[in-house]
Image (spheres, rainbow, N blue to C red):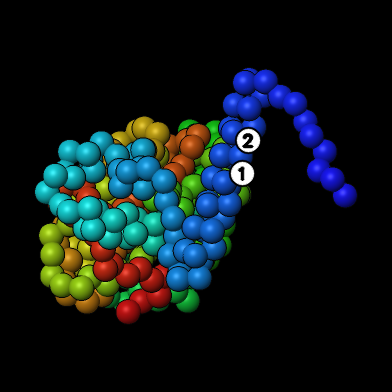
Amino acid sequence: MAAKEILYDENARRSLERGANMVADSFAERALNATSTLWGFKLRQGTVLDRFPKAIQEVVAKNKDKFTDAQLNEMADAWEQQSSIPVLACGPFVNPGGGPNTKLEHAPEKAHVAGTLKPTDTYDDNAAQPDPKGKDVWKAAGKVGWKEAALSDTALDFVNVWPAARDREQDAGYVALWVKSPKAMDVMLGCGSDDGIKIWVNGKPVHDNGASRGSALDQDKPKAALQDGWNAILIKVTNGGGGWALNFRVAAPDGMPIPGLQFSAKPQ
């Protein structure tokens, strides 16, 4: 059967060329993706900086000249691996004074300092009585235990963990996690809180801020020291009312992600 002849002008020829190039590019992209899948790697478009979330791109841009592209990619890999960190959460506890009151000691922090904290522990909420003048204050509701949760892209919303606490005021909750460091090192604990926050590392307090605010990444940047191997971290977040949340990450002193860290929601 003879091929059908089609007459076309210069504009049509250019359109045909563009179409042919698009088809060729599509086949080339498919071939690259297929090859990357076969060899077990992932193709990315853009610069190394694009691999980091906008929340820390300014930090990375400030420090990127200190590192090779390979090191920056390793840090980006570390960030992606730490995008969901398992933790334990315990609460709510009655906390008169709300956000600014980070001083009231509840049972979980006593267990952490003593080195006896276990995921199966339950506690009496008897450190304080609710403020009798408060309208929507949290009131003790029996034994308080630990439950599994996760820091998702550094963030944890306590109202999602404890729905009964929605629209309640003057309460406190705890987050426990264990971090394995490949060596002893100084770190920056990039944290944000709604409202107040206190942090312990291996039984020692390293940060205390009785704030009243919404939570965002790296609002506070306390320094801490990790030992070689596993480290126990406890975080208390106090709530005055409204939103109740935490942002938390473990970074190098300059704010860059740390490759090689491991995280667990089980005592190690």
Residue sticking out furthest to the front: 2
Please tell me how crowded label 1 is: few (under 14), some (14-19), or many (20+) other residues with Cα within 10 Å: few
2 vs 264, nearest the viewer: 2
Q: Position of residue 110 (x, y in %)?
A: 30, 66
Quick one: label 2, few (<14), some, or many (20+) residues within 10 Å? few
Q: Identify the image quadrant of residue 82.
A: bottom left
Residue drawn at x 63%, y 27% as measured from the top left: 13
User: Is 5 on the left-hand or right-hand side of 213?
Assistant: right
Label 1: which residue?
Answer: 23
152 displayed left or right of 200:
right
In the image, taking residue 32 as reference, residue 101 lies left or right, namely left
Q: Is residue 261 above or below residue 45?
A: below
Between residues 63 and 215, which one lies in front from this camera angle? 63
Q: Residue type at mark 2?
A: Gly
Q: What whole-number distance in Å separates the C-alpha atoms at marks 1 and 2?
A: 6 Å
SS category of the residue bearing label 2: helix
**Which residue reaches farthest bottom?**
268
- Residue 225: horizontal and vertical position, in percent? 14, 62
Q: Is residue 262 above or below residue 149?
A: below
Residue 112 showing in the rendered view: no
